[in-house]
Image (cartoon, coloured by chain):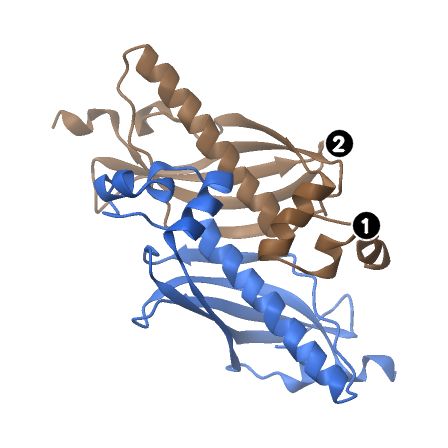
Chain colours: A brown, B blue
Amino acid sequence: MMRFYDDLRVGDRVELGSHLFTADDIKAFARQFDPQAFHVDEEQGARSHFGALVASGWHTASIWMRKLVDHRKREAEAMQARGERIPQVGPSPGFRDLRWYRPVFVGDTVSYSVEVIEMRVSQSRPDRGIVNMLGIGENQNGVRVISFESATFVERRDSTTP
Amino acid sequence: MMRFYDDLRVGDRVELGSHLFTADDIKAFARQFDPQAFHVDEEQGARSHFGALVASGWHTASIWMRKLVDHRKREAEAMQARGERIPQVGPSPGFRDLRWYRPVFVGDTVSYSVEVIEMRVSQSRPDRGIVNMLGIGENQNGVRVISFESATFVERRDSTTP
């Protein structure tokens, strides 16, 4: 979504790429940030209400961020190569309604995307628009495992030509 | 907050401990999950709108989770040592309204806490209550840097004596 506010429309959706959650990956994150038994040990995961080792919800969310940053870098490089001006995007003041719908198990591949759900011009900064986006993660069966709404300031195309 | 639903009250607040954000710490998280320039490089941070290297918001949030898990483990161990029954807490289906109020800079120490803001008995599981909690992080100047609302299922004391 490396676009100027004026080039975005509600309903626009971009695929950000996917991530395979391995046992090592799940445990490495959890040992640092969420060392609950079912995130760090297969046997304890099997005995938990999840029935298996599962990824920390914060891990699932953090990978979404990584995918977004990688996507933006790729788009910025492509725009630079075409000699286009790159829009200023961000920062984000936070997000709403983060939901973990289903556990992410070892071997799951989560595909991440982002969808524009609301847009408005900023009152405080008329050179910016505020874009509400839905961050989404779906597993290999097309089942949603995470979503959240995120507001971001996005530059308007005419912001440098007042 | 390792307590039975019946022993919690709106307004209860628990200090979870604090975390010093070092440059190495900030960059290690960001390289994995949020490699934006102002999270991975001091010079680029200095040139950004933040004016310095700052922690990823997902890092600030993930450390809250770590502090909560550590706190719960300490409480569970203490209860076990006293021969008390340990309440079932969790899982959390997600959270609402995560806000990053201020950047977290190198050298900042963030103190984390959790506060009960709403409680109700679960309709679907009468042996559980739903506790809405506010997760909070404040820097060494007492300025709030992050907060979010989180709903958690918490066991009721009489759940095993129907």
Task: Kindly identify which numbered label has been placed on residue A52.
Answer: 1
Q: Residue at point 61% right, 75% down? A: B119
Residue B29 located left or right of residue A76 = right
Crowding around mark 2 (Cα neighbors within 10 Å: few <14, some 14 to 19, many 20+) is: few
User: Where's residue B138, x and y in %?
Assistant: 38, 68
Confirm whether residue B4 shows in the render: no
Measure how far apart labels 2 and 1 are at the Cα level. Answer: 18 Å
User: At 20% across and 38% down in the image, what residue appears?
Assistant: A126
Report the residue marked by disc 2. A141
Would you identify the image quadrant in which residue B158 lies?
A: bottom right
Contact (CB < 8 A) between labels 2 and 1?
Answer: no
Q: Position of residue A94 (x, y in %)?
A: 41, 51
Name above or below for residue A71 compared with residue A38.
above
Which residue in the rendered view is the most extreme toward the front? B24
Where residue B72 sits, quadrant-wise, is bottom right
Q: Which amino acid, by three-letter code, is at mark 1? A: Ala
Q: Chain letter for mark 2, please.
A: A
Give how far across and how far down residue A102 sits, in percent: 71, 47
Residue toward you, A100 or B64: B64
Q: Is residue A88 left or right of residue B31?
A: left
* Type of the residue with mark 2: Asn
Q: Taking A70 as reference, is A45 left or right? A: right
Q: Which corner quadrant holds the N terminus of chain B?
A: bottom right
Residue A119 found in image quarter = top left
When the figure is inspected, residue A81 is found, relative to residue A146, above or below; the finding is above
